[in-house]
Amino acid sequence: MPSRWTPLFLTAAIVLVSYGTIVHLQLSRLSQLDRKASQPLSKAEYLREERQTQTSLKLLAKLPTFGFDNLVADWSFLNFLQYFGDDQARPKTGYRITPAFFQVIVDRDPRFLSMYPYLSASVSLYGGQPQQTVRLLQQGINAIPPAMQSEAYFLWQSKATDELLFLGKTQDAQHSYEMAASWASQSNAPQLQAIAQRSRQTAKFLASNPDSRRARVGSWYNILTNAIDDPTRQFAAQQIQALGGKIIQRNGAFSVKLPDAD
């Protein structure tokens, strides 16, 4: 066979492997949903399925997609939602492979902004791996072009929240809040100007008092407003109240009154 055909066949082989990986993952998820509709599986069976999913995600992370990165990211996000919402499997296996979903998506389409609240919350609050969340958020931040910075301010806020509440990195959190303010203030929209002001205020609280209750209330408020499920909202509300904050709900929207004393 002429050597000039070799690259074509190699490319075709890679495409087939990539497609096969995607099909395998999707069929695996559909099969799991099918079986769970009839009866729950044992813990060992759930763990085996999770290992299979993890292996497929690792393979998918390494394979080229030939310009279809955003489609792979979208598909991976949909599979993550199925994984996260499987309330029969997750109590038995936990959420330990959520960073693998996050990694694939941020590698393929870091500008896919709507996925970040879901993935960051699942990795930090459910998976107990905030250091991974911070790393992946930073990877996403690094890929955001200047034209998108004002709408992507919340990536810095999410990073600050993990740094302050879960990692104890007060100075890093202060810097992240300052950057959130910088990005949000690039827009003239009143809502984003208000967000920029709140982020600056939180950074100032941390600068003057690293143990600031007001800063922590502000961080839990970020979690409350971006929560993806009711248990997370309830937990964030409890933390705000325990720190002396007051939650105000009006017309379906939340606001918070900061503690009088810091």
Image (tube, rainbow, N blue to C red):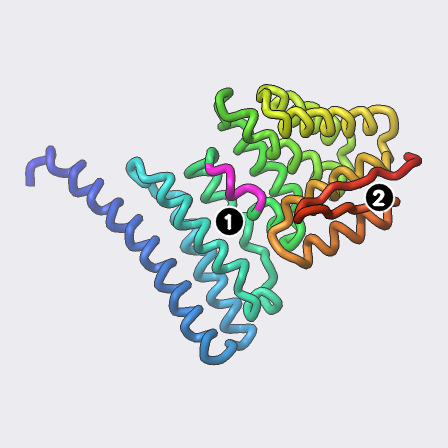
Quarter containing the N terminus? top left
Say which residue appears at 58% left-offset and 32% top-offset. Answer: 138
Q: Mark 2 sits on what residue?
A: 245
Q: Position of residue 185 (x, y in %)?
A: 63, 21
Task: Give the number of callouts.
Answer: 2
Q: Element type at marker 2? A: loop
Q: Which badge, 2 or 1, is on the more N-terminal residue?
A: 1
Residue 79 falls within the magenta-colored stretch = no
Say which residue appears at 74% left-offset and 43% top-offset. Answer: 220
Amino acid under disc 2:
Gly
Q: Quadrant of residue 93?
A: bottom right
| Relative horizontal placement of residue 21, taking residue 36 as reference (left or right) | left
Residue 114 falls within the magenta-colored stretch = yes
Query: Which residues are drawn in magenta?
Result: 112-117
Outermost residue, left direction? 1
Say which residue appears at 76% left-offset and 51% top-offset. Answer: 237
| Relative horizontal placement of residue 213, taking residue 47 as reference (left or right) | right
Quarter containing the C terminus? top right
Q: Element type at marker 1? A: helix
Q: Is residue 224 above or below residue 31?
A: above
Q: Is residue 96 above or below residue 115?
A: below
Q: Position of residue 238 (x, y in %)?
A: 80, 53
Outermost residue, front direction? 251
Closer to the camera: disc 2 or disc 1?
2
Q: Mark 1 sits on what residue?
A: 100
Say which residue appears at 36% left-offset and 39% top-offset. Answer: 69
Looking at this view, is 68 or 131 the one in front?
A: 68
Outermost residue, bottom direction? 39
Looking at this view, is 88 or 225 the one in front?
A: 225
